[in-house]
Image (cartoon, coloured by chain):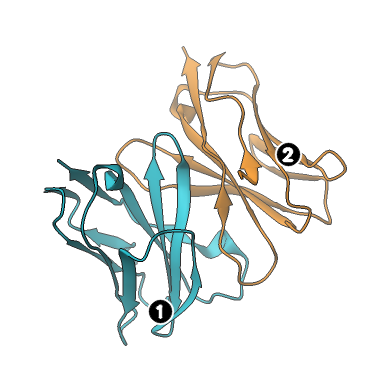
Amino acid sequence: DQQVKQNSPSLSVQEGRISILNCDYTNSMFDYFLWYKKYPAEGPTFLISISSIKDKNEDGRFTVFLNKSAKHLSLHIVPSQPGDSAVYFCAASRSGNTPLVFGKGTRLSVIA
Amino acid sequence: KAGVTQTPRYLIKTRGQQVTLSCSPISGHRSVSWYQQTPGQGLQFLFEYFSETQRNKGNFPGRFSGRQFSNSRSEMNVSTLELGDSALYLCASSRDRHIMNTEAFFGQGTRLTVV
């Protein structure tokens, strides 16, 4: 039973355009959500997070939107750059000391 | 400061053997978590250690075990290896288990191949 789902295994976007990566979750107890970025042969690195008390969080070119009623979040990257090409993982947690639950990832390719 | 260090980086083992992977967390970090990454399943939680005690365990068979030492370094062990254990094993450290997981830093992982 997959609690965090990233239904698009891959996404290709032209440089300068917007990249939108989607994530759905089933566990209504999740109240903290994170996006991680992973390059080949490296561990995931934290990108941006959002608490369930918010519906938007922005950090430079990266914005995460949370729709609690739909149990859906999305990561927007504007403008997309070739260096953004990586696998993006969505993760969720219940506040406090619970382990992160990850989606299977979406491979983003930004084409110059 | 030095990041999370995992050793070895690559490992090839034969079915039925056992393997031990090591993780040295960032200095001052007391929580260590282990994840298994496979192409089909993404990152799956194995276990979490804090102050030498296992605090959480994922849904993996008893062949997977771990421990944490007084200096916060952690090891995980997989016995009676199966082909399906081939994966990237990732370790993440954080200062305290009661903070938001933004503080979790991942190592580069150990790529285990079982033949």
Q: Amino acid at mark 1?
A: Gly
Check the image and report above or below for B83 versus A86. below
Q: Which residue is mark 1?
A: B28
Structural distance between the alpha carbons of marks 2 and 1: 33 Å
Q: Amino acid at mark 2?
A: Leu
Q: Which chain is cyan?
A: B
Q: Nearer the viewer, mark 2 or mark 1?
A: 2
- Which chain does the numbered disc 1 sit on? B
Quick one: label 1, few (<14), some, or many (20+) residues within 10 Å?
Answer: few
Q: Give the image location of residue A95, x and y in percent.
A: 70, 66
Pointer 2 and pointer 1 on the same chain = no
Locate the C terminus of chain B and report the quarter of the image it occupies: top left
Which image quadrant is residue B114 in?
Answer: top left
What residue is at 27 percent from the left and 44 percent from the top? Answer: B86
Quick one: label 2, few (<14), some, or many (20+) residues within 10 Å?
Answer: many
Compared across the picture, whether B29 is left or right of B108 comes to right
